[in-house]
Image (tube, coloured by chain):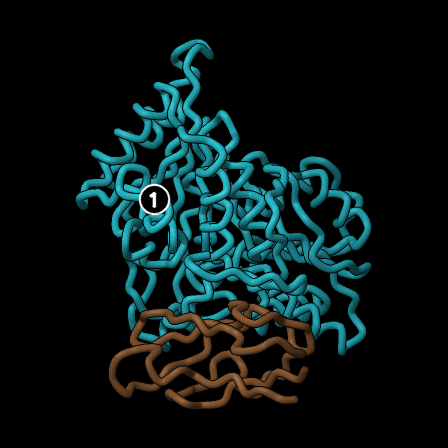
Amino acid sequence: MTTTSTTSSSRKLTIARAMAEATAHEMRKDPSVFVMGEDVGPLGGVFGNTRGLHDEFGSERVRDTPISETAFIGAAVGAASDGMRPIVELMFVDFFGVCMDAIYNMMAKNTYFAGGNVKVPMVLMTSTGGGYSDGGQHSQCLYATFAHLPGMKVVVPSNAYDAKGLMTAAIRDDNPVVFMYHKSLQGMGWLGTEKGATVATPEESYTVEIGKAAVARQGRDLTLVSLGAGVHHCLRAAKTLGEEGVDVEVVDLRSLVPLDRETVRASVAKTGRLIVVDEDYHSYGVSGEIIASVVEHDTTCLKAAPRRVAYPDIPIPFAPTMEQWALPNADKIVDAFHQMMSN
Amino acid sequence: MSTAITVPEDLWEGDNEGVITAWLVEEGSQVNQGDLVAEVMVEKAQYEIEAPAAGTLTITKQEDEVVAKGTTIASLDA
């Protein structure tokens, strides 16, 4: 992005660059696509995901907004309902409180209320996750909060390849899509750097189908299911357990709505053991939904009770040691497996 | 011929140190002159490092390593 490009076939992108590249490509192709949000213009987004767009497309199509999420997300719903394809950023998902009426009473439901006569083709992109001591109002994931409410698609990429393909698919989708990106995967150093998220990414445009999980690693003994940053914890845990002779499969959900239950069930049918890893809160969340999706379908495939490694049901602590204590990590996943096998 | 990739002296203002946040090309791959190869973060701002020549990349400063202006971070062998 920006003024330089890399022509090498082994080119890698951060998720931040992948999001910007997908957005730029769709903006060149489709004049109805535009971007709106706080600091998305000349700054390029506080998480880097609109870098270069203002230079190329200008202030009309890359619009910095006042700090009023209620106003600009409501405006995006109106624009989308009237034929535009806005990409609007809620800088931290934690800020959803002020603008939830625009999101879940308007964006998510207008098509239904209008008997299918109004489309709302917009992307709501929003940052998730903590780990860098930004306090309880800048560090949540809230995946389940959005996935719970009908009317919105929800995607959560774990790497740049998927981020580019999912962003392109989201912009082209005629339904509202919530694009939740984890800060530690953005390639912005001060938010923590997850190297595994920066992967080879084609320059040409492509889509990753919304609603399809990926098997990030194949194995026979244990299924780890996760999303976003959790996928990388799972891959590290899989490596550790591999040294103990345990063959671990890792399923990257990629989309929460629609949810690819088939891929999860097929994996657990093969391994017989399931641990769900989620940086969102433990109770009433993604981890419970995944386990229910397996056991309501078939309990005979299970060799052990499923487990979850999720965020405890507490506000995110500011103190670094307390926050790190609360976060999921590879060691906790390995421990959960050992406990599973000792019962 | 080997060409060093160094952090340009004029990449950012002042003499603060930075950190490599991402390598955007795999170790051992062929890059062209002007390719974007790495990102360096200084005080929460990111800067881009381009290849000064074509060649095969050998990385000497990995992600999360601290760098200053003039630090050699990789070499290119043509």
Where residue A336 sits: x, y (%)? 62, 66
Q: Residue at x 36, y 27 (%)?
A: A107
Q: Quadrant of residue A191?
A: bottom left
- Asked whether, in this view, residue A49 is left or right of residue A268, the answer is left
Front residue (pair A313, A328): A328
Q: Is residue B70 above or below residue A323?
A: below
Dividing the picture into quadrants, the one containing residue A110 is top left
Chain of the residue that carries numbered disc 1 in the rendered image? A
Residue A273 location (% of width, % of height): 73, 56
In-front residue for pair A289/A36: A36
Residues A93 and B36: in front is B36
Q: Which chain is brown?
A: B
Give the crowd class for mark 1: few <14, some 14-19, many >=20 residues within 10 Å. many
Q: Which residue is mark 1?
A: A89
Q: Nearer the viewer, residue A192 or A198?
A: A198
Q: Colour of chain A?
A: cyan
Horizontal and vertical percent position of residue A25: 50, 42
Question: Total marks drawn?
Answer: 1
The residue depicted at 55 percent of the width and 43 percent of the height is: A166
Q: Quadrant of residue A332?
A: bottom right
Amino acid at pointer 1: Glu
- What residue appears at the point 79 percent right and 55 percent down from the top-left corner? A271
Which residue is drawn at the image coordinates 45% and 64% (left, top)?
A184
In the rendered view, tell whether residue A147 sits above or below residue B61: above
Q: Position of residue A119 (x, y in %)?
A: 43, 19
Q: Secondary structure at mark 1?
A: strand
In the image, residue A205 sits, relative to residue B40, either above or below, namely above
The quadrant of the picture occupied by the C terminus of chain A is bottom right
